[in-house]
Image (spheres, rainbow, N blue to C red):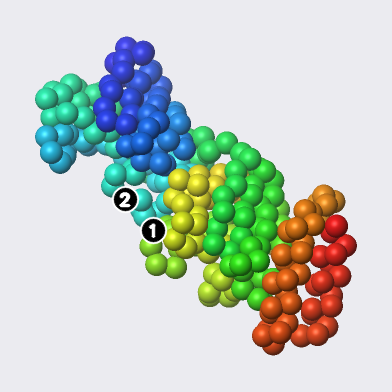
Amino acid sequence: MSRMGDVLAGFHAAWEFESDSVLIRYERGMRTPKLFSALGERRIPLAAIAGATLEPGRRGTVVLRIEPRAGADPLAEAAAGQLREASDPYRLVLPAARDTLAEHYRDELRAGVTESGPAERFLVAAPAVPLSFKAYDAKASFDGRTVRFRWSWTGASSAKWKAGDQSFPVSGLSGVEWRSPEAFEGHLRLLRGEDAPAQADQDLGAVVFGPGYGAVHESLPFAAAVLAAVRSRGAPAAVPAAAVPRQDGRRRDPADVADRIRHLGELHRAGLVTDEEFSVKKAELLAEL
């Protein structure tokens, strides 16, 4: 590699080349992809790189791109090829006049690659926790050990409301499925080694996205962090931990409880909740005051 500290600045990011890694610093601003701004910076070890390419870009630009090794980056694994080109964190767009310099760094990257094939573990750091985001039917949060879904009274299905808010210890998960909110039926689903409803809006281990909910720059780092935590703990136990209602000892906002009871009443009047279910759930909500 080039001498430590060499920097190649492009649109929306600057790459700093070091002896064993590339430090990518993303810009913040109105024109910068929101995912870049959310990531801030990322250090990519050479061991996590499979290669590098340089191609002509649009409107008088060239594009230098790192090819990550399969299994080396939790963000790339969670994205599973769904990111739009402009939001690819491994692309650096440069003015075409800098193509000679970009070609030099491409060759340096290729020369520094020593590993090949899928990585046995994640080599790129996962986004830092705690993380949270608002989906269409829930607020999702992750503290590094447990994923929690707090259902929205305006968006959650009756099945989710009946079951109550959910907590999923990392030890009971086998993976994460992220479907971009920019695609049809976008969702984040926790894989638990058990049969689950095909529809994400009926799965207690999933939250669904919608226009304005579950944005890529919020939900993808969340999915990557959960996936990294799952992989770092190894495979889950033979009998996965079941989803359990939220019981963290904290009291809820009375206004929030009132909203939830009001929505529960609407479900009851619509015939989606039985008399017994209505009474039990209402008592649970009142007990949280």
- Pick the residue in front: 135 or 232: 135
Q: Residue at x 51, y 41 (%)?
A: 121
Query: Which residue is labeled 2 in the image?
Result: 84
The 10 Å Cα crowd at callout 1, few under 14, some 14 to 19, many 20 or more, is some
Q: Of discs 1 and 2, which sits in the foreground?
A: 1
- Given residues 15 and 51, the one toward you in this image is 15
Which residue is label 1 attached to? 182
| Residue 129, image quadrant | top right
- 202 lies left or right of 106: right
Identity, as a three-letter code, of the amino acid under mark 2:
Arg
The x and y percentages for residue 131 are: 60, 43
32 lies above or below 236: above
Are there few (<14), some (14-19), or many (20+) residues within 10 Å of tag 2? few
- The residue depicted at 54 percent of the width and 62 percent of the height is 136
Residue 132's place in the image compared with 149, above or below, is above
In front of the other: 8 or 272: 272
Alpha-carbon span between mark 1 and mark 2: 9 Å
Do the residues under discs 1 and 2 have CB atoms within 8 angstroms? Answer: yes
Q: Which quadrant would residue 108 be assigned to in this image?
A: top left
Q: Earlier in the sequence, mark 1 or mark 2?
A: 2
Q: Quadrant of the C terminus?
A: bottom right
